[in-house]
Amino acid sequence: MSIRLNDDAMRQFRVAKVFQETDEHKRSMEFSSDGLRLLLCDHSALSIFSSTRQVELCQVHMHHYLPDVACFAQQDTRVLHSTSKHDYSIRCLDLNTRLCVRVFGGHAKSVHTLASQPGNEHVFISAGRDDQVYMWDFRSSTHIHRIKELRRPLCAFDPAGLVLATSTGTDGIEIHDVRMLGGEPCQKFVYQVNDKANWTQLQFAPNGKSLLLSTDHSWCFSVSAFDGTYQQSFTGYSNQSRLPLDATYTPDSQFILSGADEGRIHIWRAADGYPVAVLKGNNVGPVRCLRFNPRATMFVSSDLLIVFWMPMANGVYDWVDRLKPGETISITENDVQKKAVRVPSKIPMPKPKMDMGFKMQTLKRKRACTEGTLVDLTEVLGNKDSLEDGEIPDE
């Protein structure tokens, strides 16, 4: 049996355990594909935690490399990490021997994004501050593909590992078929947005139907992964220092969580942007890293502290049979809340301008690309006050 994630369940998350391993701000965080282990990266060390026992399994010092990002690779027995010293190479660390087994060189500046391809233990991607996106294969001595002429690029695989999304600046997203990276993108989405808010994170929803983009301002938003149309914005949190604060989906794609100043975590419904809760934990500064476990009802946040969140033991929940791998739960309107709640209506937005020369070759049905006006996301933000009234204090 597992907990069905609805509004009431999301409000009942509380701090389960707190760690302070170093005095460094955590730079990146990732769960293993089975959800059993958690990888944390800062400039001084890489740390592996057990998600079930909530204990530290190992720590590897990184003072000679000062990594900005790390991820699991090759069935979670090895870890890839960037370097911000020397040659900005990507290094592969074997967790059993604690030795570097491969070095991937090519970036001219430090790497800020690393991601392994789902379903393929040999392939991973990297995006750097040199405006280059590389695809690597452990079986090759050099990169197998390079996507250039991007500005501040972000990249992410879809959950099936068949599609790669890349962004350029704050005005475009390209969808690539990973089997034909040497050709043109399958689709291009063009947007008109506020240049003052830089995009800092790009990720697919676990169901693959939408893309979430975080910014260094006090908002994030979602677009359709199929045609690029605007869906929802998620606002109301504080980010005074303009930091790249993480956001994350729940495994069923029903909710979005985002870090905020003063250790707060804001939660919205992904479908309509309704603010569900504001959680306050042990974190003191801005919550920079935030990840929901892909296989368990728990998530982890971090600034200087590493905080494990779990539902209250004496809470009231809806229980369902445990899901099979890849299966999701569809929540009906009757399941969302027992009493009527005023829900903000969706903001209608025009479709983004699409390039007529490209088609999504991975989709089962063909879609005609029609040219429309540019999407202006700045009109939907508004000046909203912080949602401190909805804050849920730690108990």
Image (cartoon, rainbow, N blue to C red):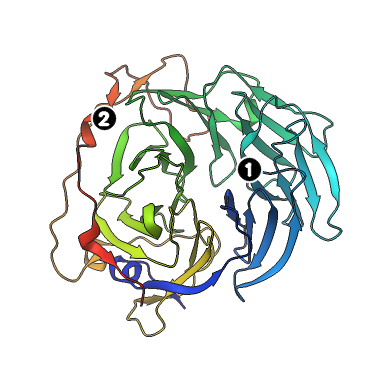
What mark, if any, has residue 378 been given in the picture?
2
Q: Is residue 32 visible?
A: no
Q: Pick the residue in front: 235 or 261.
A: 261
SS assignment at label 1: loop
Label 2 CA crowd tier, 10 Å (few <14, some 14–19, many 20+) = few
Report the quarter where the C terminus lies.
bottom left
Which tag, 1 or 2, sits closer to the chain's start?
1
Horizontal side of residue 341 vs 120, given as left or right: left
Q: Which residue lies furthest to the top in this view?
A: 357
**Residue drawn at (65%, 36%) of the image:** 125
Q: Residue furthest bottom?
A: 314
**Residue drawn at (60%, 73%) of the image:** 54
Horizontal side of residue 156 vs 312, given as left or right: right
Distance CA(mark 1)–CA(mark 2)? 30 Å
Amino acid type at mark 1? Asp
Q: Which residue lies under the disc numbered 1?
A: 68
SS assignment at label 2: helix
**Residue 304: percent from left, percent from top:** 54, 58
Pair 1/2: label in front = 1
Examine the image and state in which quarter residue 87 appears: top right
Q: Pick the residue in front: 58 or 53.
A: 58
Amino acid type at mark 2? Thr
**Residue 263: percent from left, percent from top:** 40, 59
Q: Residue furthest front?
A: 23
Horizontal side of residue 136 vs 160, given as left or right: right
Q: In this view, does 184 lie above or below 269?
A: above
Q: Is residue 194 visible?
A: yes
What mark, if any, has residue 137 been given in the picture?
none
**Residue 199: percent from left, percent from top:** 43, 33
